[in-house]
Amino acid sequence: MDRSLAEFAVKQAMRRGAEYADVRLTETDTESFALKDGSPEMSGFAESKGIGIRVIVDGSMGFATTNYLSTKSITHLIRETIDYAKKAKAVASKIKFLPHKPIKSHIIVKPKINPLTVPPKEKIEYLKYLDKEATSVGVDVSSRIFDMTSGIHERFFYNSEGSRVYTKIPFMNLVYVINIEKDKQSSNDYFEFGSIEGWEALKSWKVKSRLIDKIKSIYHNMKYGVAPPKGVTDVVVSPEITGIIVHESAGHPLEADRIFGREGAQAGESFVTPEFVGYKIGNPVVNVVDDPTIPKSNGFYLFDDEGVRARRKFLI
């Protein structure tokens, strides 16, 4: 990663009239492998690079990105970004960032086993091993998909206030989708494992035992399950359902970009408004916490893409 490009971009933006500028320079190496019903699907090897530039010009914001990482293309992008900001002035309210002390940080998460050093053959064999185990339970698992993605992600944040944050992390993700049939009925399950670790994450996930337990559990429900009672009743939901409820009902609505309408055209807005701060929602014993600082967690980061230090936050 050529970090000097970030510094070059900020200097160019300030030279051309920006009152504030920041840059996100990213580089990701990824390998992906998939298995469907025991047969390998298309594999992927990707290297992606890009730069995102944000400026404030007379209180208006402009943002643009490119994956052409040369000083010539970045200079052209700066012109476009500043032009966007000037045009936005006619329709947008004036933006002013809070004063922020410059941050300098260098964060590297070192994997025990770099996932990119594991041979592709070994990764495919691992997926075949899971597929074989899934079909050896004595249950008709009629359809099976296993998908593994791993890699290394680098990110460099730099702004005109002097902040410099470099992050390099490994990542591992494994997804399975299974369909179980019994007496002309079917039931399926989807589950995703993820961690900011290397190849060693597979051991801590205990994928095989959790997969087999899930297959047996689904089959047991299909064989012995009874219809739920009618009417209003109390229920105990699984961690997966709890996660979905929290993600959709608390996570998305409490995203600042949605609350302020900045993603309205892409992802919708929110029923939450700034006036909701301090407003009590739901049962007082229920709390929802957003904490990206948990080591190895799938959404782990210590600084966000605005150079702000991550922290544990109570959403509800």
Image (cartoon, rainbow, N blue to C red):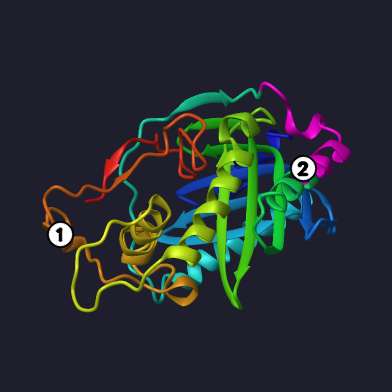
Using the rendered view, name the quadrant where residue 83 is placed: bottom right
Reply yes or no: does residue 125 show up in magenta: yes
Q: Residue at x 41, y 74 (%)?
A: 268
Work out whether 264 lies above or below 150: below
Q: Is residue 309 left or right of residue 21?
A: left
Q: Is residue 33 left or right of residue 77?
A: right
Segment colored magenta: 112-127
Residue 17 appears in the picture as rendered: no
Q: Position of residue 305 (x, y in %)?
A: 49, 44
Work out whether 122 lies above or below 232: above
Q: Position of residue 315 (x, y in %)?
A: 26, 50
Q: Position of residue 51 (x, y in %)?
A: 66, 49
Q: Where's the N terminus, which quadrant?
A: top right
The residue lying toward the viewer, choosing from 232 and 287, is 232
Q: Position of residue 124 (x, y in %)?
A: 82, 44
- Identify the secondary structure beneath mark 1: loop
Tell me, yes or no, whether the two marked residues, 1 and 2, touch with CB atoms within 8 Å: no
* Pointer 2 local density, CA inside 10 Å: few below 14, some 14–19, many at least 20: few
**Main SS type for the magenta part?**
helix
- Residue at image mark 1: 281
- Residue at image mark 2: 129
Task: Give the Cα distance between marks 1 and 2.
Answer: 46 Å
The residue lying toward the viewer, choosing from 57 and 42, is 42
Reply yes or no: does residue 152 show up in magenta: no
Amino acid type, label 2: Tyr
Q: Residue at x 38, y 71 (%)?
A: 92
